[in-house]
Image: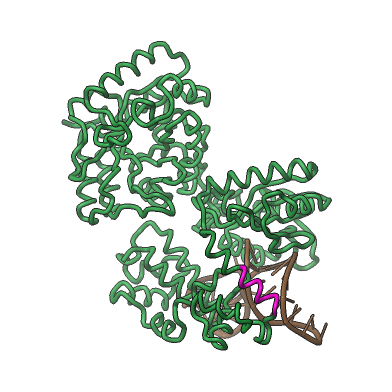
Chain colours: A green, B brown
Amino acid sequence: MDNLAIARVLAEIADLLEIKGENPFKIRAYRNAAEAIGHETQSIAALSDAERRALPGIGKDLAAKIAELAGTGSIAYHQELIREFPPTILDLLNLQGVGPKTVAVLYSQLGIRTLDDLEAAARAGRIKAIRGLGARKEAQILKAVTERRSVAGRRLASEALATADSLVADLAERAPLAHLTIVGSLRRGCETSGDIDILASASSPDAMQAFTDYRLVERVLAHGDTKASVLLSGGFQADLRLVPPESLGAALQYFTGSKAHNIALRERALARGFTLNEYGLFRLDDNVKVAGDDEAALYAALGLTFVPPELREGRGEIAAAEGSALPRLVEQTDLRGDLHSHTTASDGRADIDTMARAAAAMGLQYLAITDHSKSLAMANGLDEHRLLEHARAIRRLNERLEHITLLAGVECDIRADGTMDLAHDCLAELDIVVASIHSGHAQEAAQMTDRLLRAIECPWVDVIGHPSGRAILRREPVAADWTRVIQAAATAGVALEINGQPDRRDLNEQLARQAHETGAMLVISSDAHSPAALGQLRWSTLVARRAWLSADAILNTAALDDVRRRLRRARRTM
DNA sequence: GCCGTTTTCGGCCCGACTGTTTTCAGTCG
C-alpha cells in the first residue's frame, strides 16, 4: 500500500470526524498525519512501528491504525464512521459556503447524501425551512452546486499564474500606490493551484475596489473592507487581502502559508511569549509590536533564518531554520545550460539556430538539442540516418556560434521491453542521450521497473527523461519500484531529469528529494519545443527548490567541461 | 490524537466575512 493511499484514508477519517463534530484537535491530528505521509519519501507501509512513531505527528494510536491498514487493507474505525455517514456526503464538503456542520444538518434532517439530493432539496425549498439556514443560504447552495458542475477544482500552476499576472497588472494600473504580491500556493511554487491569492499593501482601499470591479469577475463571493473573494470567468477563484504597509511582512508570511507552516510558526511565537497574526508579531504581555513590516525580520524575531516560500510546507523547515541548516536552494540563474530541447527536426517549432540564440539570450552557456527518435512517428521522430545527419548540422552550426555551445543529442524512446529505439553505435556518436518513455504507460509495476532498469543498463544512456511519465491532473505516474530505479541510476551514474513542462514537473518533488538523498545526479531541464518554452526551466527549478536541493545537486549548474566529464558516457565501464 | 524549556495532563493559531441572529456560529483561508 503506497503512502498516498494511506494518506487518503486518514484524510477521509478527518473529514468524517468533522461532520460528526468531533474534537477539532483530533481532526487536525489526522489531517497532519495524512499530509506528512503524503509527502514522505520512504514507504510508510514498509516501516516498523517504532520508525513510524518517530515521524512527527504520528503517535501510538495513529501508528497502530496505519499498521492495521497496511496489514488488512482497512481500518475498523474508518469502517465504523462510514456506517454512520455515507461517504458520498464528503462530496458536499467542498462546496462554497457549505462546511461540516451544514453537511451534518442536511444529512440528519433531510437525509441528503449526494449532490443531486442537495440540488433537489434546494429547488424544492426544503433547505430554507431548516433552523439556522435561510433563503439566502439556499440560493447560495444552489449556485455552488451549479458552479461545482461547471468548473474543475485544482488547475495547473502555470494557468493560475497567467491569470494572476493579468489580474495583478490590471490592479497595478488602477491602484498604482498599492504594493501587490501573488501569495498562497503560487508563491510556494506548488504544482497545482486551487485559487489565486493576492496581497495588496496600501493605505487606501483603491485596490479593493479595483479587484471587485475587474472585468473578468463573474461573481463576488465576499466583499469586506480588507478582504474580498471573487469567481473569475474561466473558473478561478481569486482572493484579495488589503493590509497597511507596516504589516506587509507579516501579511506576506501569513498569506503565503502553508497552513501547516503557519500553525507551527504561531505555536512557536506563543512558546516564546509572542502572538503572531497577519498584522505583525506582538509581545503577549504588553502587546508591543516587535516585527511586521519585513518578512525576513519576522522570521529573525522568532529565532529563525528566512524560510524560502517553497519550503513552507511543514516538512521540517522550521527545525532546520532554527539550526541555520536550511540549504541554499538552487536558483534558475545557477543553471549554466539546458540538457533537453527540441527543434523542427522532430516536433519543435524552431530550427537549431533559433533555439541556440534564444538559449544564449537567456544567458545559458550550453544547450543540448535532443529531438525525438523514430518510434515517436507522430512527432516526426528521427531514425539513425536522419539523427546522424542532424548531429552533423548541429556541430557545423556550433562552429559559428560564439556565446553558446550546442550538444548533439537525442531523446531516445525506451521501448516497451526496455531496449533503446536506436542502435547503440548511433547513440555512441552523440554528445548526450536522454532516454524517455512515451508509450505503454499502463504496464504493471514489475514490468515497468524492469523496463527502466534495462534502460539504465544501456551504457549510452546519460539521462532518464521525465521518469514517471505523469501528466499533472490528467495521467497518473507509471507504476514502478522507484527505490530500485533510483538506486540503479545512482550506481550507474545515470542522471534523472526534472522536466520543466508545466504539466509534467517530472520527477516530482518527493522523488527528486529521494533521488538526491540516494546519491543520484539530477538535471533541471526545460524540454522546450520552442524558444519561449526555454522559460519552462522556471517550473523544473521550482520542483528542485521544493525538493530542498541546492545548486551542487544539479548537474547542469556545472560548467560544460565538467558536465561532459560527469555524463555517464564519459564514465562508463565497458 | 499529539506532545513536552512553565505541562505525561491540559493545552492545542488567528482573524475576516456572511447569514441568521439579537450576540454568534459557521465557513474560509
Q: Relative to A492, does residue A395 appear above or below in the rendering?
A: above
Q: Is residue A254 visible?
A: no
Q: Nearer the viewer, residue A274 or A389?
A: A389
Q: Is residue A206 magenta?
A: no
User: Please, which residue is most extreme toward the right here?
Assistant: A204
Q: Residue at x 21, y 55 (%)?
A: A446
Residue occupying image coordinates x 23% and y 51%: A449
Span shown in magenta: A135-143
Image location of residue A296, percent across then percent down: 66, 48
Q: Nearer the viewer, residue B21 or A557?
A: B21
- Position of A383 with respect to A161 (left or right) is left
In the displayed structure, does residue B5 sit left or right of residue A174?
A: left
Question: Residue A445: x, y in percent?
Answer: 24, 56
Residue at the limit of the structure toward the left, as seen here: A574
Front residue of A337/A137: it is A137
Quadrant of image for the N terminus of chain A: bottom left
Q: Main secondary structure of the magenta part?
A: helix
Percent coordinates x, y for residue A54 in the rendering: 41, 67
Residue closer to the observer: A279 or A57: A279
Q: Residue at x 24, y 36 (%)?
A: A375
- Residue A179 appears at what percent x and percent y? 74, 45
- The answer to which image quadrant residue A137 occupies is bottom right
Please tell me in which quadrant of the rendered image residue A338 appears: top left
